Image: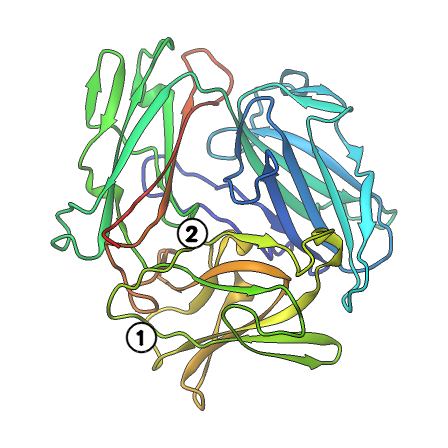
């Protein structure tokens, strides 16, 4: 059975059962699967139709493997769009080999960096909506299962999305939560039945475990719909992300307590953190990360892999397991990121093999319904700066697919 080492699962909180967007590796040999749009590693994997999308990953060896990619168009819920033909969404050829690769240089952990993108000389994507790219090892003994999947969305902005984030909620006298309100203007699009034709997703810091999916609007107008003061759009505010940076494997970088060599790997132990009782501002990138090293050249092939050790100093917490999370594991409590409790240190700990660079991370406790919470591990403070993303899909009556027609990205800014 396949195991997703960078798992991204969508838990449904509204009407539609949604399987979720997944960008993940199915192999311990495949690391650092990334989707970068328009050469900006900090942006969500959403780009206007015709924009540049690059997919990259590392295989932990210097042995060349012939990898093949396959592009698939998906519905708003990331299930295959079976009513759409390949010729509808792809101009060119599918199932093509990845021809751009390079071995690592001067690293203790050997790896080969592979990358490819769209559009390319073999393929151009035609429809707005969701795309899943599966990568296969083209070997005789292959079992025809992908080694990784990468997901992104192409946007054709036919509708305008306006949104705001407020700490004015009815949950707890505005101390620990943030509320999203938004409106969709149809523009020139004809929408007869908004609740049937539109599908929406609201995400906090690109997380799918607490995403709000297909919540019906509570205000309908002639040329638009609104979601105003909906309790389902109240999110726990969390705390600012922790961060560390490892540019030189011989020096303690930001957030690093000590660096050690323990054959066959370098090890970086981060400073221990503890749950906060009061809000503390710290500039972050909301869980994102950037691969780089001290020279900041050929980062993809000259950055080292090393074990990073995370510590959460706290008495053992009641409730579910504790995980370390960030965009490098797609923001979801991945099984490999589950922390164990050390009675001697009185701390939760976890060690992960990561590539050199700048990282944000956060500790979350998994609830029975599969949602990661920060209440006991970090604290929830209304002042926390968070990123919110809203996606709007439209399938008019008689259409065969969900087109991504609206998108908004905004940040909450408290009183820092």
Q: Is mark 2 on a helix, strand or loop?
A: loop
* Residue at position x 47%, y 65% in the image: 324
Assign a secondary structure to mark 1.
loop
Q: Nearer the viewer, residue 116 or 296?
A: 296
Residue 164, position in %: x, y?
Answer: 26, 35
Asked if residue 329 lies left or right of residue 260, the reply is left
Q: Are marks 2 and 1 in contact (CB under 8 Å)?
A: no
Q: Distance between the residues labelled 2 and 1?
A: 26 Å
Please state, as top left, top right, bottom left or bottom right, where the N terminus lies in the image: bottom right
**Quarter occupied by residue 248:** bottom right
Residue 5 image offset from top left, x and y in percent: 60, 57
Relative to 182, residue 238 above or below: below
Q: Is residue 320 visible?
A: yes
Earlier sequence position, callout 2 versus callout 1: 2
The residue shown at (33%, 43%) is 13
Out of 297 and 404, give the one closest to the viewer.
297
- Residue 344 on image: x %, y %: 45, 91
Asked if residue 202 lies left or right of residue 290, the reply is left
Please say if 32 is above or below 194. Answer: below
Relative depth, front residue between 58 and 73: 58
Check residue 286 in the rendering and tell me which mark sits there, or answer none: 2
* Extreme residue toward the bottom, this view: 344
Instruction: Name the residue: 63% across, 30% down.
Output: 52
> Looking at the picture, how far across and down is residue 219, in whole percent?
19, 24
Quarter holding the C terminus? Answer: bottom left
Q: Name the residue under label 1.
A: 318
- Residue 228, relative to residue 127: is it above or below? below
């Amino acid at each position: 059975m396949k195991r997703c080492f960078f798992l991204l699962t969508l838990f449904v909180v509204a009407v539609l059962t949604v399987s979720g967007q997944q960008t993940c590796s199915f192999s311990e040999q495949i690391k650092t699967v990334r989707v970068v749009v328009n050469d900006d590693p900090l942006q969500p994997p959403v780009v206007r139709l015709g924009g540049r999308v690059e997919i990259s990953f590392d295989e932990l060896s210097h042995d060349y493997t012939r990898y093949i990619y396959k592009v698939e168009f998906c519905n708003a819920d990331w299930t295959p769009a079976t009513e759409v033909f390949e010729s509808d969404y792809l101009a060119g050829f599918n199932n093509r080999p990845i021809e751009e690769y390079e071995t690592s240089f001067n690293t203790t952990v050997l790896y080969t960096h592979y990358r490819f993108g769209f559009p390319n000389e073999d393929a151009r994507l035609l429809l707005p909506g969701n795309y899943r790219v599966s990568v296969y090892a083209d070997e005789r003994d292959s079992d025809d299962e992908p080694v990784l999947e990468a997901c992104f969305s192409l946007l054709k902005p036919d509708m305008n999305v306006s949104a705001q984030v407020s700490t004015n909620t009815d949950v707890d006298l505005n101390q620990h939560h943030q509320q999203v309100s938004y409106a969709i203007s149809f523009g020139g699009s004809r929408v007869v039945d908004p609740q049937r034709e539109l599908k929406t997703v609201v995400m906090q810091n690109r997380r799918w475990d607490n995403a709000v999916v297909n919540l019906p609007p509570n205000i309908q107008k002639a040329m638009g719909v609104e979601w105003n003061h909906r309790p389902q759009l109240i999110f726990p505010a969390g705390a600012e992300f922790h961060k560390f940076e490892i540019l030189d494997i011989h020096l303690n970088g930001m957030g690093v307590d000590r660096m050690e060599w323990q054959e066959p790997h370098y090890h970086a132990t981060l400073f221990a953190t503890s749950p906060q009782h009061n809000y503390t501002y710290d500039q972050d990138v909301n869980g994102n990360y950037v691969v780089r090293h001290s020279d900041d050249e050929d980062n993809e092939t000259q950055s080292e892999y090393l074990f990073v050790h995370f510590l959460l100093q706290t008495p053992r917490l009641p409730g579910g397991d504790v995980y370390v999370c960030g965009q490098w594991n797609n923001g979801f409590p991945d099984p490999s990121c589950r922390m164990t409790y050390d009675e001697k240190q009185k701390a939760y700990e976890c060690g992960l093999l990561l590539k050199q660079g700048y990282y944000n991370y956060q500790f979350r406790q998994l609830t029975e319904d599969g949602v990661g919470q920060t209440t006991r591990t970090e604290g929830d403070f209304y002042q926390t700066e968070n990123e919110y993303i809203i996606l709007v899909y439209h399938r008019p009556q008689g259409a065969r697919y969900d087109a991504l027609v609206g998108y908004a990205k905004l940040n909450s800014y408290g009183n820092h």
